[in-house]
């Protein structure tokens, strides 16, 4: 049995954030682009360890043998409960931010969401109370918690905040592809309470400004064009198709659509 914890240099009680951070550090050291061919097998092993330990179900199955050996060696619980200490002070925004982060670190996702929504106005921002990197890590975890509860728009806004920081100065690096994919996945579906797709189109208009690969940006622009067409905004829809074609001229159907639009006299800006 491979020791995934040793590969990442963490203990069995490591939080998901610690798993993610350890993987980033180890993967960077062992990545073939930096360490050459000799680092390839180590990089694959580290990636495998991350994929198991970052999945709640896979990690529980992996940890089963570990728990059996540690069950009788756990230290007695401390009398002072840090979570209760923070909970008693949740009307203070800094304490609330710490409490949300504590719950996210200890797999209390539903509690973290409830706390986030309990603040005045129904939405609390972690950003003013965490440093940049911690906000990106905890914001990502909170977005996952919101996604699990079906709160798609709130998850989108958290991920978009992370994207804004990443575009300004990279931190997530190769993890950023996951953030971009999650944002794209959100706008591919119908959003709640958005019958006329206005919010969805606003999100798409925003997303095409991010650093997507050319083919994915073309797909987003094609979807944007379809929604604009349904809304009767034909010239705007045409512009999105022209831009999609410039990005991915071999994408099925684009060449024919562009020709038809030109034949109809649609202007290219």
Image (tube, rainbow, N blue to C red):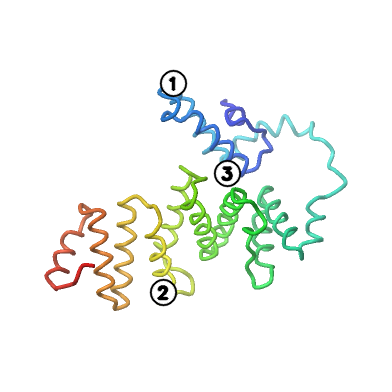
Say which mark, if any, is on residue 38.
Answer: 1
Q: Residue at x 69, y 68 (%)?
A: 119
Rendered location of residue 36, percent (x, y): 41, 24
- Front residue of 106/168: it is 168
Which mark, by number, is residue 3?
none
Q: Using a 10 Å C-alpha cutoff, classify the residue at mark 3 as few (fewer than 14 neighbours), some (14 to 19) or many (20 or more).
A: few
Mark 1 crowd level (few <14, some 14–19, many ≥20, 10 Å Cα): few
Q: Quadrant of residue 195?
A: bottom left
> Residue at point 58% right, 38% down?
53
For the N terminus, the image quarter is: top right
Query: Does residue 54 sit above or below 9 in this rendering?
Result: below
- Residue wearing tag 2: 198
- Where on the picture, by quarter, is residue 269? bottom left
Front residue of 55/45: it is 45
Q: Is residue 197 left or right of residue 95?
A: left
Sequence-first tag of 1 and 3: 1
Describe residue 112's horizontal placement relative to residue 261 as left or right. right
């Amino acid at each position: 049995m491979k020791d995934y914890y040793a590969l990442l240099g963490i203990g069995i009680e490591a939080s998901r954030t610690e798993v993610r951070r350890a993987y980033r550090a180890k993967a960077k050291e062992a990545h073939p682009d930096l360490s050459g061919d000799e680092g390839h097998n180590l990089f694959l092993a580290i990636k495998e360890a991350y994929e198991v330990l970052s999945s709640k179900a896979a990690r529980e199955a992996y940890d089963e043998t570990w728990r059996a050996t540690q069950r009788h060696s756990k230290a007695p619980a401390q009398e002072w409960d840090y979570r209760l200490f923070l909970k008693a002070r949740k009307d203070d925004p800094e304490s609330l931010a710490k409490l949300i982060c504590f719950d996210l670190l200890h797999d209390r996702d539903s509690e973290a969401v409830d706390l986030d929504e309990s603040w005045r106005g129904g939405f609390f921002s972690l950003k003013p109370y965490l440093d940049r990197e911690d906000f990106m890590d905890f914001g990502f975890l909170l977005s996952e918690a919101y996604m699990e509860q079906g709160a798609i728009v709130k998850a989108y806004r958290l991920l978009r905040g992370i994207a804004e920081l990443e575009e300004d100065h990279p931190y997530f690096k190769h993890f950023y592809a996951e953030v971009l994919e999650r944002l794209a996945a959100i706008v591919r579906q119908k959003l709640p309470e958005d019958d006329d797709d206005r919010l969805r189109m606003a999100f798409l208009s925003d997303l095409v400004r991010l650093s997507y690969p050319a083919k994915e940006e073309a797909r987003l622009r094609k979807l944007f064009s379809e929604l604009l067409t349904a809304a009767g905004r034909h010239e705007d829809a045409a512009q999105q198709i022209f831009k999609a074609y410039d990005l991915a001229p071999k994408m099925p159907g684009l060449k024919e659509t562009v020709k038809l639009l030109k034949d109809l006299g649609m202007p290219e800006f």
